[in-house]
Image (spheres, rainbow, N blue to C red):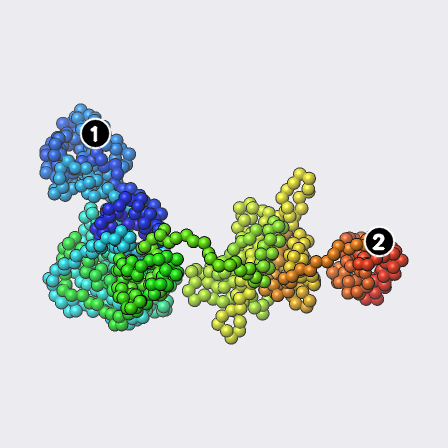
Amino acid sequence: MKVSLNWLRDYVEINIEMDALVHLLTMSGLEVEGVTKVGEGFEQVLVARIDSIRRHPNADRLSLVQVSTDREKFSVVCGATNIREGQVVPLAVIGAKLPNGVQIKKSKIRGELSEGMLCSEIELGLGADTTGIMILSPELPLGIRLGEALGLKDEVLDLSVTPNRPDCLCAMGIAREVAALTQQKMKYPVLSLSKEGGEVHRKTSVTLLDPDLCPRYVARVIEGVKIGPSPRWLKDRLEKVGIRSISNVVDVTNYIMMEYGQPLHAFDFEFLEEKRIVVRRAKAGEVFVTLDGVERKLDDQMLMICDGVKPVAIAGVMGGMNSEIRDETQNVLLESAYFNPANNRSTSRKLGLETEASFRFGRGIDYEGCPAAANRAAQLIQELAGGRMVEGMVDVYPKPIQRFPIRLNPPKVNRVLGTSILPERMKSCLEALELNVKQEEETLVVIPPSFRGDLEREIDLIEEIARIDGYEKIPTTLPTGSPVLEKREKRILAEKRAFEILMHHGYHEVVTYSFTSPGSITPLNLPADDPRKVQLPLLNPLTEDFSVMRTSLIPGLLEIVHSNLSRKNLDLKLFELKKVFIPRKGEKLPREVIYLAGVATGLGQDPHWDVSPKPVDFHDVKGCLEDLFESLQLHEVRFTAAEDVPYLHPGKGARIRAGEDVIGVLGELHPETAAHYEIQGKACLFELEFEKIVQLAKETRHFESLPKFPEVQRDLSLVVDESLEVGTISEAILGFRQPHLEEVRLFDIYRGSPIPEGKKGVTFRARYQSADRTLTDEEVNQIHQKVVAQLEDLFHVELRR
């Protein structure tokens, strides 16, 4: 939101320096992001009068012009054709440097002395008119600087206004804040309307068919206007806040929007069929051409402004080409209305059309300010474009919006803020913001004004008192009381541990949107009955790409991989720990499940001169997860082959089980899925249902003394069927529960001669150890032979010779 200092001074007296004003506004919650000085560079551009004009003796298209200020006379060579004797014009004297970079020097042009330059708007940076010299008001005093004469010297504040403060999206709203912070009185525009013309109710009418979407609609009619350019002061104010001047009538509507915060719309009254306004919902599929020339397709939740026959505007968003103000317009119907903020936001998003008007309507405007804004605009239109004001206004307000009182307990204010503010000071702070405050015994009863829709609860008033009294006055204190050791939630501890392990393995956290596109799940090739294929749609999506809730973290991760690979960032280890949303049959709300998912591509570690580069593979990711499970004390987790996970490479995927419960999947990405995301080379991913992991994780650790007696190792080389999983064998060995058998680890797999085809050689290392004595070789050999015999009976394996 931009506002000029000169504009603010129309409503409030400002006697402090700019730095102090910026500090006050920022500390009160209206952050000033920047201050721009404008109107500089006119110190040597003076207001002068043309005394005489004669032809240049040596050039047909040039004139010799004598101009004077209050003290001096100047001879200037000029090529403009719009100059006349007696006109008041801007004169750049010798030494002046214009905003366009031109420096004025004393010179001879075709043999004649030129002691300055008469300037056009574009040369002064005050407009786009290149047709001739800028003509000034004859009432301006001669000899004064142009910046001073036109009020050009100004400072423009750029403020960051939070969404809950739409009242500050206008000059008067900012001025109210300044007045409250500096203990000044607001000066509101004085309205004096002409009573000429016929009765407005005989000219037009307004029908609200959907008062829930348009609670109030005000209309005024001005007849006999003359469309033309706006005066310099109006153009200047609009340009400073970033709005382009169009014509006097349209500029007035924009001016009132930036002054009152009330967006207005002006219709050419002659193009309104039946000369009336009807406010209704659009018909599904109805088409309307807006002022920007774009054909918009509407739905039945959008609100339209219509005449007796056809739509003429999308309510609160943009008008139509069929009723816009033209150069030939003579009669104007002025709209000042209040539209439902939520509906307006929805319409603006659906159409992808955000205007200054929709920005304000979508946040909520002052519904009681509609008549005042209409009157102010009508008055300015009459002053700038002439015409006759039709007496009265149409104000359709079937169900006035009520503001309810808020009770404020002064002792609570000080308890919340840690202050000792007196109740009288609290009352004055609130009254400075134009809140109605009454004292009832020990309580303040406050009725907020209609322009402060954000004030609904007692805590809102407490914040206002803190803002106006000054946040910097709140004392800094240390918390009191004895520290309490708080036991952290098990889930939080598990998340913290997961982050530590993954980052230790080189993974980086990413955060993707919970909203996604309906087609995002398609590349995973899930079967039709997979619950993840049913995605919950949003009622008011921002765009089609964010129209459903995600059911898996994997598509979002793979999109990030695709984005990084396209930028030559090839070595990636990424993870995300967030919710997915699985719809439940027969219920409106989905099941929200926390998942931990990760993906790795490229090299497994950074290149090093002493280590051969190795692409990341299944075992790198599996090792990372084994560390995670170990840190969470999930000792019963096992990995089983998974051939039917559609987005994992056949034969290179695994299910992760805890007992008989599947808690996740792991594997290399399926080539088809990888091709969709343009991933070349290996990409390995995992997805874990984190809530199940939290349930299984153990919170306490038990200390065991280090073994006092030595271990004994025995190797076990077997020839087994190719289809037999190694994990199944190691689980079986431990399951035999042979005494003193502490650990079994795989350390070799071999295929080839002399191993028969369809078989593989696997070698395990078994560790035997006793807690109370040293085992003998004979004892270990006996136990080991029992293990071999049990394996032969169970799996029909052969010992490898």
| In front of the other: 687 or 155 | 155
Q: Quadrant of the C terminus?
A: bottom right
Disc 2 marks which residue?
754
* Residue drawn at (18%, 53%) of the image: 227
Could you tell which of marks 1 and 2 lies nearer the N-terminus?
Answer: 1
Kind of residue at badge 1: Ile
Q: Is residue 54 left or right of residue 99?
A: left
Residue 666 point in image, percent of width and height: 64, 59
Quick one: which residue is furthest to the right in this view?
778
> Picture quarter containing residue 426?
bottom left
Number of disc labels: 2
Q: Is residue 277 left or right of residue 53?
A: right
Q: Note whether 576 is above or below 62 in the view shown.
A: below
> For numbered disc 2, what is the local secondary structure?
loop
| In front of the other: 548 or 457 | 457
The span from disc 1 to disc 2 (Cα, nearest Å) is 103 Å
Disc 1 marks which residue?
94
